[in-house]
Image (cartoon, rainbow, N blue to C red):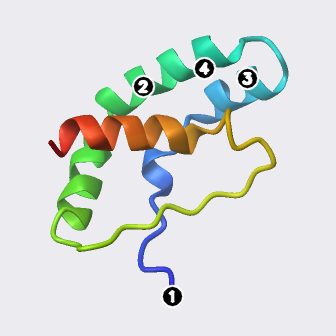
Amino acid sequence: MIDLWAKEITPTTELREAYHSGQIAWPEFEAKYHAELEGNPALDGFIDTIKAKDTVTLLFAGKDTEHTHVLVIVDVLRYKMQ
């Protein structure tokens, strides 16, 4: 069962399209998405929702598991939830 779809903390359409079209490389996408998350008030609400859970599983759809926005989310969550 999926409990939550956190669409409000996904990359903006502009950022996602810039990366997928090749306008920006992964390191730039990663840095810009990190900045988006840091400035996104919905991130705090997401953290409040998951912090009481024993287990949190993040699901995503994609073929490239080394270059996915989920990795940025995980890094930010690890930092903020220490």
The location of residue 29, given as percent across then percent down, is: 60, 20
Q: Can you identify the residue that label 1 sits on?
A: 1
Q: Is residue 34 above or below residue 10?
A: above
Q: Can you identify the residue that label 3 sits on?
A: 19
| Marks 3, 1: nearer the viewer | 1
The residue shown at (32%, 72%) is 55
The location of residue 14, given as percent across then percent down, is: 65, 26
The part of the image, by quadrant, that contains residue 67 is top right
| Cα–Cα gap, marks 4 and 3 | 6 Å
Q: Residues within 10 Å of mark 3 (few under 14, many from 20)?
A: some
Q: Amino acid at mark 1?
A: Met
Q: Label 3, secondary structure: give it.
A: helix
| Cα–Cα gap, marks 4 and 2 | 8 Å
- In the rendered structure, find residue 34 and report the number of the disc placed on it: 2
Image marks 4 and 1: residues in contact by CB distance under 8 Å: no
Q: Label 4, secondary structure: give it.
A: helix
Q: Amino acid at mark 2?
A: His
Q: Can you identify the residue that label 4 sits on?
A: 29
The residue shown at (20%, 38%) is 80
